[in-house]
Amino acid sequence: MSGITRILGIDPGSRITGFGIIESDGRRSVHVASGCIRTAAGALPSRLQTIFSDVQALVQQYQPGAVAVEQVFMARNADSALKLGQARAAAICATFGSGAEIFEYAARAVKQAVVGAGNAEKAQVSHMVAVLLNHRKALEVDAADALAVALCHAHTQPLNERLAGARRLVAGTRR
């Protein structure tokens, strides 16, 4: 992650999908935009179309270099988990063609990267997002979660790149 990267964070949901866009050099991150995509009541396919169209418009407008998406966790209700997975897929598919690389993070990893505790409460995540981005206005919960996913990527990707480079170096010396 050399230089400044624009990152689109997505917190998928079939009713509300949060999005957060930051610019980061790996050490310092700046809030660009955030909000929520709200779908109208009705059949799931029309809600998925809204998510797809709105995420596609965000990608066209902000042209992120990376997309970070929260992974689906297994909920108690299988039907809810399936709908969440479909909403997640609609959001991911909307980024295809943009050239942005897609990264996925577990909710626990996001909380760990932003708060320092994988079991952090939503209020703690929202507070730390505001602190890390020097954001003074109140954030909607889903938007704060999406910004947290983007921050997780900004905080962990430089380390992942260094580790990958070290692995290549070690693999090259074994030949």
Image: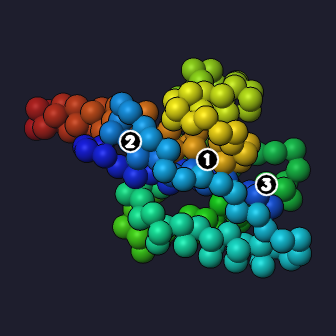
In the shown orientation, is residue 142 left or right of residue 69? Answer: right
Q: Which residue is mark 2?
A: 24
Marks 3 and 1, the one that precedes in the sequence: 3
Q: Are marks 2 and 3 in contact (CB under 8 Å)?
A: no
Q: Position of residue 79 (x, y in %)?
A: 86, 59
Pointer 3 residue: 81
- Point 79% across, 54% down: residue: 81
Disc 1 is placed on an element classified as: helix
Residue depicted at x 46% and y 72%: 60
Q: How many marks?
A: 3
Above or below, comparing residue 20 to residue 110 in the picture: below
Task: Give SS at disc 3.
Answer: helix
Nearer-N-terminus badge (2/3): 2
Query: Which residue has dot 1 on it?
Result: 146
Type of amino acid under label 2: Ser
Q: Position of residue 23 (x, y in %)?
A: 41, 46
Left or right: where does residue 47 sit relative to residue 62?
A: right
